[in-house]
Image (cartoon, rainbow, N blue to C red):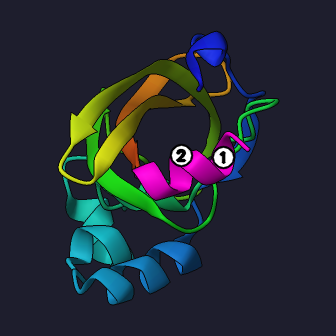
């Protein structure tokens, strides 16, 4: 289904690591560690400022890969792994984009499953990588049949 799009990338999108969004994010995940939200604590930390929680990049805009359509319903979240070169700092600009790195299929108990492997990148304005995220999305037989119509 998506084999012809392997290697396709979205355009880079500018995101801001906003303090208010971090506060709401930490409340939603139930992790209000002071390194994320308390300015004084952040100043006293080894980073000298507040940082974002490790899964915070989930809220970023990564752009769209032209021609890649994944439905809003019926997908299965298979795996998501973050790798950081350094933490995300409150207030900084992060340029994000997505790459479709692989697609394969496997026979499952309920039919043929499709596995879409995406890699997302977060970079400094100068292009240096801050983090990467690998994500596996599983497409069930039912959803696959709808997509290939």
* Magenta region, residue range: 140-149
Give the x, y percent position of residue 35.
25, 68
Question: Image quarter for residue 7?
Answer: top right
Q: Nearer the viewer, residue 31 or 139?
A: 139
3 left or right of 37?
right
Question: Image quarter for residue 16?
Answer: bottom right
Q: Quadrant of the C terminus?
A: top right
| Picture residue at 81% right of the left edge, 29% below the top | 66
Disc 1: CA contacts within 10 A as few (<14), some (14-19) or many (>=20): few
Dominant secondary structure, magenta: helix
* Residue 123 vertical position relative to residue 25 in the rendered view, above or below: above
Q: Nearer the viewer, residue 16 or 57?
A: 57
Give the x, y percent position of residue 99.
57, 23
| Picture residue at 64% right of the left edge, 31% below the top | 97
Query: How far is the residue under mark 1 from the one under mark 2?
Result: 5 Å
In the rendered structure, find residue 144 and report the number of the disc placed on it. Answer: 2
Q: Are marks 1 and 2 in contact (CB under 8 Å)?
A: yes
Q: Nearer the viewer, residue 81 or 136?
A: 136
145 in the magenta segment? yes
Q: Secondary structure at mark 2?
A: helix
Give the x, y percent position of residue 144.
53, 46
Q: Quadrant of the N terminus?
A: top right
96 left or right of 12?
left
81 left or right of 115?
left
Disc 2: CA contacts within 10 A as few (<14), some (14-19) or many (>=20): some
Q: Nearer the viewer, residue 107 or 94?
A: 107
Q: Which residue is mark 1?
A: 147
| Picture residue at 42% right of the left edge, 49% below the top | 141
């Amino acid at each position: 289904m998506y084999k012809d799009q392997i290697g396709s990338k979205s355009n880079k999108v500018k995101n801001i690591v906003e303090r208010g969004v971090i506060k709401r994010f930490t409340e939603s995940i139930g992790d209000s560690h002071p390194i994320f939200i308390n300015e004084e604590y952040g100043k006293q930390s080894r980073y000298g400022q507040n940082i974002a929680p490790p899964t915070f990049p989930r809220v970023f805009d990564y752009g769209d890969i032209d021609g890649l359509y994944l439905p809003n319903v019926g997908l299965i979240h298979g795996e998501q792994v973050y790798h950081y070169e350094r933490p995300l700092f409150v207030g900084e600009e992060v340029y994000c984009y997505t790459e479709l790195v692989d697609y394969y299929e496997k026979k499952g108990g309920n039919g043929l499953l499709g596995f879409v492997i995406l890699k997302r990148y977060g970079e400094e304005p100068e292009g240096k990588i801050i983090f990467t995220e690998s994500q596996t999305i599983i497409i069930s037989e039912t959803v696959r049949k709808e997509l290939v119509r």
